[in-house]
Image (cartoon, grey):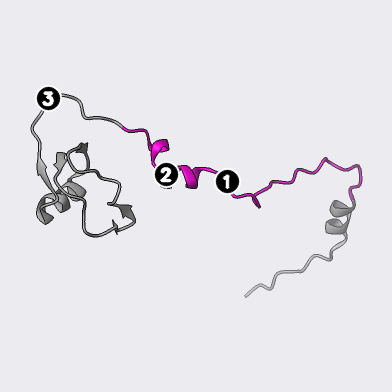
Amino acid sequence: MRIRVLQTPKIAEVDGIRLDVFQPGVQYEMGNCLGALFLAEGWAIPVDSVEPAMLIPLSEFSADHRASTSPSNAVREIYAPSDDDSSLAQAADRPQHSRCKK
């Protein structure tokens, strides 16, 4: 569904979807549920146009940019394989438990 936003929504988000990123005067292509919300609340009007809608890459939204960068404490440690197979030996030394049959 294509709409033209008339005014910025009065609420910041609905069901985890940020609404404050939609700018008045800009046409957007959106799903039926979100489009119906904009139309029902009077935030937008439907647009009947054969021209393609303007696309904005998600990476240009500030919220998406912050989410795409990994936190500084997220470091994956990679250990070289060791010649010591002590962990396998420990697992082999464990006594096996017999299963109870009912």
Q: Secondary structure at mark 1?
A: loop
Alpha carbon separation for disc pair 2 and 1 = 15 Å
Tell me where residue 64 appears, x and y as whole percent. Answer: 43, 44
Q: Which residue is rendered at x = 21% and y = 49% of the image?
A: 34
Relative placement, left or right, of 35 versus 13 is left
Asked if one can make out residue 1 in the rendered structure from this viewpoint, the answer is no
Residue 25 or 82: which is nearer the viewer?
25
Magenta stretch: dominant secondary structure: loop
Tell me where residue 36 appears, x and y as whole percent. Answer: 14, 50
Q: Which residue is mark 1?
A: 70
Number of residues whose C-alpha sits closer than 10 Å to that of mark 1, classed few (under 14), some (14–19) or many (20 or more): few
The answer to whether residue 82 is above or below residue 88 is above
**Mark 3: amino acid:** Val
Residue 70 or 60: which is nearer the viewer?
60
Q: Which residue is rendered at x = 20% and y = 37% of the image?
A: 26
**Mark 2: amino acid:** Ser
Q: Which residue is rendered at x = 34% and y = 56% of the image?
A: 16
Sooner in the amino-acid sequence: mark 1 or mark 3: 3
**Mark 1: amino acid:** Ser
Name the image quarter holding residue 62: top left
Alpha carbon separation for disc pair 1 and 3 = 40 Å
Q: Which residue is mark 2?
A: 62
Q: Is residue 73 magenta?
A: yes
Asked if one can make out residue 90 in the rendered structure from this viewpoint, the answer is yes
Q: Which residue is mark 3?
A: 50
**Contact? badges 2 and 3 (CB < 8 Å):** no
Number of residues whose C-alpha sits closer than 10 Å to that of mark 3, classed few (under 14), some (14–19) or many (20 or more): few
Q: Secondary structure at mark 3?
A: loop
Number of residues whose C-alpha sits closer than 10 Å to that of mark 2, classed few (under 14), some (14–19) or many (20 or more): few
Q: Which residue is rendered at x = 21% and y = 29% of the image?
A: 53
Sooner in the amino-acid sequence: mark 2 or mark 1: 2
